[in-house]
Amino acid sequence: MTRKLVAYAAGLMACTTFTAPAFAQDADGLEAPEVDDNVIIVTATRRAQDVQDIPLAVTAVGPAQLERQGVNEIRDVTAVAPSFSSTTAQIASGSVVLRVRGVGTTSNNIGFESAVGIFIDGAYQSRPGVALGEFVDIERVEVLRGPQGTLFGRNTSAGALNITNKRPDLSEFGGFANATYGRFDELGVQGAINVPVVEDTLALRLTGAYRERDGALTVVDAAGNEIGDTNDIDRYLLRGQLGWETDTGFKGRIIADYAKNQSSSGAAVQVFETPLSPFFPAVGLGATGGQPTNNFARDPFDQRAIKDAAQDRTVALNRIPVADIENWGIVAEIEHPLGDNADVIFIGSYREFSGIEAYDSSFSAIDILNVDLDTQIDTFTAELRIQGEALGGRLNYMIGGYYSDEQIEANNRFTLGEDFGELTGFLFAGLSGGATLGTLGPEPLTTLTGGLDPAQSSSLNQFTQSAESWSIFTHNTFEITDGLEFTLGARWSDESKSGGFTQIENTNDVCPAFVAGLTGGALPPLGPLEPLAVLTACFGFTAPADLPESAILPTPQTFQDTFKDEELIYTVKLGYEFSPEINAYASFTHGYKAGGINLDTTAGVFGADPTFESEEVDAYEIGIKSRFLDDAVTLNIAAFHQEFTNFQVLEFTGAAFQSFNVPEAISTGIEIESVIRPNDNWTFNLATTILDSRYPDDCNGDLVNVTVISLCGNDLTNAAGLTAIAGVLYENELTDNLDFFISAQGRMVSDERTSTQAIVPPTVPAGATEAEIRAAVEAAPLIVGDVQDANVKINLRAGIGDVDDAWSIEAFVLNVTDVVTRGVTFNNVLRGTGSINARSSFVLEPRTYGVTVRTQF
């Protein structure tokens, strides 16, 4: 991969490439400074600064660029930032994964926190799902690349997303309204109004948005009849802000928002069928086992069939996913001067998130496993900092403290469907070559338990967690000589969590009956099928907890546990200004993401410790930022190397979620951002990330564990080696009263992995040596459908409007060539085993198009 990295870099540097890394136009603090159009003001350092002057890799995007690339929410930021990516699996509230430089936390476990921190108007959002909502009235979005822990409160070991909404204007009345109609009957309405209550002193800003769209996936039943659609959009947002500033410099704003989201995302397309499928009819599951589309791959090496299955966008379900999510919060941001050269700033927030979601976890039209989730997250945060200048302006200092309190309660009900017994019979028959059909029949669990039927067995499991975090921090920049600056930042962070798993209700009588027969010697010999019998009779999601035999069988155990950790996070940077147009920097940062408690039924199996360790990173970076030709050209380059220890990982095996820490992971690469504006009409841009994010060959360190060793030598999930965004914008006047624009932008992504594991982890005997495990791993088959092929997606937009922006109309096409790609690929629930398990994928958006009308006043 290193040679490939060098080759990519050499090729790009030999070409003339340009990008628009940002179009942000406003600043932090409660007063927006007047700036030139080519000057990009960001708050990545918690101060309002020109992006070209800060020793940090950051991509900043303003409202015009967000709108032109169809960025409606945080997951869409991939369209404008090549080092940023996102995926979503079953549930929007808990399975959204954000990545920066190929690094993120793969999880739909509420106990895991994101490696990419999200901050909206300075307030930390505890999970990516909490921040899902409509982008409207946005001032800018900043993607901060690399660990950011000294300046931002929590969990930024990979990077941070810093989002700033437009502030109330204290002097001018105004507003805007937008309306969009598009494919899948999409209807979107956005608007805002700004009202000065006391001119130059107090103002109110009200913002709202509504968006609905039919599903992009067609849902069929077992007979292949269309019964609906899914992956739809149905959400709205209301936000109010009260801003003020007095003659003494005391200023602030209070922000309150409410959002409702009933969009569904919990459906996946099957892309590979298990070779055991001929046994479906023998147990009464029909010819296709609830997959009537029959358009998936049957040969594990048939990449074309896997691609075609994803492109078809048809899913078979026995239950259409539903969601009902409410989210409200309040933020207070207050600033007061302390003399002429310092300010004290307070940012406090409180947020409540509640989500009810239900989906078919088998992703087929047979009734296997149904999931109903009820999640509540309450978060309070407070930050107080003092910042200013000293030593005649040579020292820019910041000191502060941060506190957060988070309360989580998740009530998860898992119910076995009417066909679960038959699916177990299918597995028994397939793995025995049909022998069990004559001995145990089509429903072996019923036979083995004296007539009990697992259908409709359910378990209501409750997971709770109370988390408290506090820290003190400082960030200081000292001008050593003219043009040479030294930055030192540090944060002492203290994290504590307490939580656990309680089983409120369980109706599964098959599991205890089977266990009694097994331990009492009443069952017939099952031979190599015994582990499968234990797995299915006591399926982890629905098995009763705390059975007496749980010490010797992998059945759930309830637990209450605590996690406590503290860490010094720090950064050292050196910046040099060669000229007003050229700056360079070098930095080292030690970052951190807290560990915690695995909130899953399998976390305490066999008395295991349900906690997982904190993730740490040492990051090295050098960069250069430049403008030349009278600011017509901007070119920024960053090179980085990041070493992660105790990298947090979670994967779904098809029967259970496994969480663990990998001792080592790395991310190395080069980022190039450039823009050229030869005149007032043309803008050309290209941004490129060349990446080598992987588990080293010795990623296990001293840990002799087959699951971890199976990862060694593989790329990280969704970490493409090359991502490039290229675009062109032309704008001009048609008449004295009309102007127009046309823009085109493409995003190219090289091959990337879409699963946690690249191989099927082998079964090894207890006590196997590392050499024996590595030999077994080397011989293990590859996971089917893991790699998403390289692809290019193109967006087009054109518009015409009044020269004073009083009105405009735009037409757009996103993903012009209708390239459907897979974001996450996984094993279907019990639809096979190991290398012969069926596989499904969550696919990304198809082609969409529409028209937007805008007015501004």
Image (cartoon, rainbow, N blue to C red):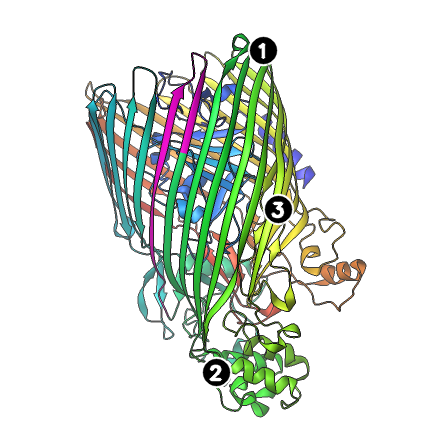
Residue at 53 percent across and 46 percent down: it is: 790
Neighbourhood count class around disc 1 (C-alpha, 10 Å): few under 14, some 14–19, many 20 upward: few
At numbered mark 2, what does the secondary structure look like: helix, strand or loop? Answer: helix
**Tag shown at residue 281:** 2
Q: Can residue 106 be seen from the camera position used here?
A: no
Q: Which amino acid type is shown beneath numbered disc 3?
A: Ser
Describe the element under mark 3 as helix, strand or loop: loop
Residue at 44 percent across and 64 percent down: it is 412
Q: CA distance from mark 3 to mark 1?
A: 38 Å
- The residue singled out by tag 3 in the image is 614
- Tell which circle, 2 or 1, labels the residue nearer the N-terminal end: 2
Q: Quadrant of residue 802?
A: top left
Horizontally, is 495 left or right of 257 in the view?
A: right
Q: CA distance from mark 2 to mark 3?
A: 48 Å
Query: In the rendered image of this protein, does residue 837 appear above or below residue 708?
Result: below
Q: Could you tell me residue 706's position as x and y percent?
A: 70, 60
Q: How many circles with numbers are drawn on the protein?
A: 3
Depth check, front residue: 176 or 82: 176
Up-down relation of residue 680 to residue 144 (above or below)? above
Tell me, for residue 483, which label it has, or none.
1
- Any magenta on residue 332? yes
Which-is-in-front pick, marks 2 and 3? Answer: 3
* Screen quadrant of the N terminus: top right
Is 466 located above or below residue 402 in the figure? below
Magenta stretch: give its range.
319-347
Main SS class of the magenta portion in the image: strand
Mark 3 vs mark 1, foreground winner is: 3
Q: Position of residue 23 (x, y in %)?
A: 40, 26
Magenta-drawn stretch contains 34: no
Mark 1, secondary structure of its residue:
loop
* Other-residue count near label 3 (Cα within 10 Å), few / some / many at <14 / 14–19 / ≥20: many
**In the rendering, at what x and y percent does residue 694 appear?**
64, 45
